[in-house]
Image (tube, coloured by chain):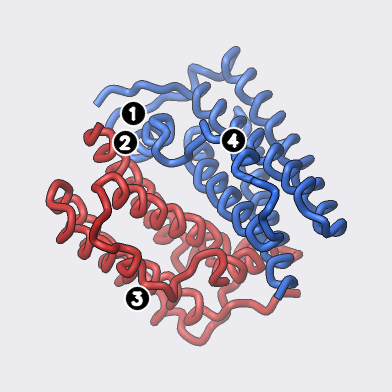
Amino acid sequence: MVMPFNADEVFEMAEQIERNGARFYRAAAKKIPEVSQVFSDLAAMEDEHEKTFAAMRSELSGTEVVPPVFDPDGQAQMYLRVMADEHVVNVKTDPVEQLAGKETPEEVLKMAIGLEKDSIAFYVGLKESVSSRAGKDKVEAIIKEEMGHIATLSQKLEALK
Amino acid sequence: MSISFNAIEIFEIAERIERNGVKFFRRAAEVLSDQDLCQILLSLAEMEAEHEETFANMRKQISHKERELITFEPENEMTLYLQAIANGHIFDLKKDPSEQLTGKETAEDILKLAIEAEKDSIVLYIGLKNFVPAKAGKNKVEEIIEEEMGHIVVLNQRLTALK
């Protein structure tokens, strides 16, 4: 049996992912004038996601993240714990530090897509682990918005060709 | 914006991801000397081969009778996401991941590459799941997503055990 996450732990991680994303986009907006507006808009959206997760955390603080679905082997919980491992989604590393300043717009857009993919992979586990009452639909909505970000970044990449 | 992809293409990408996974795990099992780990990688290869077959069957079914059920609305964010995938920016499918292995990789290197590949497949299948109608096998896509999540768990356990 896997030790269940408590809500504080898991939402703090989600908030950190969003904070890292917003910081990355703001730094990238300064470095890459061609896509500065897009990056600034994405940063603002990540700020909103952070607020959503923070609100969910304060509502659920002190509780276990209870699997709403049949999860006899605790697989959703196990996945979430693994995703929180630094090998899988490393929230401790500030992605802004990856920007040396010499990257091409293409490289920065690809790095951004990588960060968005990581957040989707984490939130898929989060979604499985929170009940409908605790805001499963909010997590689902954020996943869709992150997919929308990938679409936007990809359109910009296409336009660079 | 006009849509320049169809459901069949998205399934083909899913099949390619699985095929690449099979090749990667089999090649990795040749490269590594830890027999226990090799067995795990070979069993993951087998599961990916089954996923490929599932996606291929779904694609065939869709091409015959379910195609009309799948519609893509332009400007819908899910459509744009799938368009991004079809454009090839999200997954570099042309590179054969097994060719990335020179034979000098450590078990740690291989496990990390494998975890990245599994994350990629989950990110694609979440998009795929959104457009597959229940009748055309949405639950099969969900099952595959759960299995890929399970693969990440297994791979990470091995990675932790190396320390």
In this view, the mark in front (2 or 4)? 4
Provide the chain ID for the residue under circle 1. B
- Residue A112 percent location from the top left of the image: 34, 54
The reply to whether discs 1 and 2 touch (Cβ–Cβ < 8 Å) is yes
Q: Quadrant of the N terminus of chain B?
A: top left
Which secondary structure lies at badge 3? helix
Callout 3 amino acid? Ala
Residue at which label 4 appears: B96
Q: Name the residue under label 3.
A: A55
Residue A14 at x, y percent in the picture: 42, 70
Distance (Cα) linking label 2 and label 4: 32 Å
Secondary element at tag 4: loop
Q: Nearer the viewer, mark 4 or mark 3?
A: 4
Given the image, on which type of amino acid does mark 2 rest? Answer: Asn
Give the spatial CA distance, label 1 vs label 4: 32 Å
Figure quadrant of the C terminus of chain B: bottom right
Could you say which disc has been placed on residue B76 in the image? 2
Residue that protrudes farthest toward the top in the picture? B64
Q: Quick check: can you spot residue B151?
A: yes
Lateral position of residue A130 relative to residue B90, left or right:
right
Type of the residue with mark 1: Glu
Please state the horizontal and vertical placement of residue B24, each as a whole percent of the image.
Answer: 68, 42
Q: Do the residues labelled 4 and 3 touch (CB within 8 Å)?
A: no
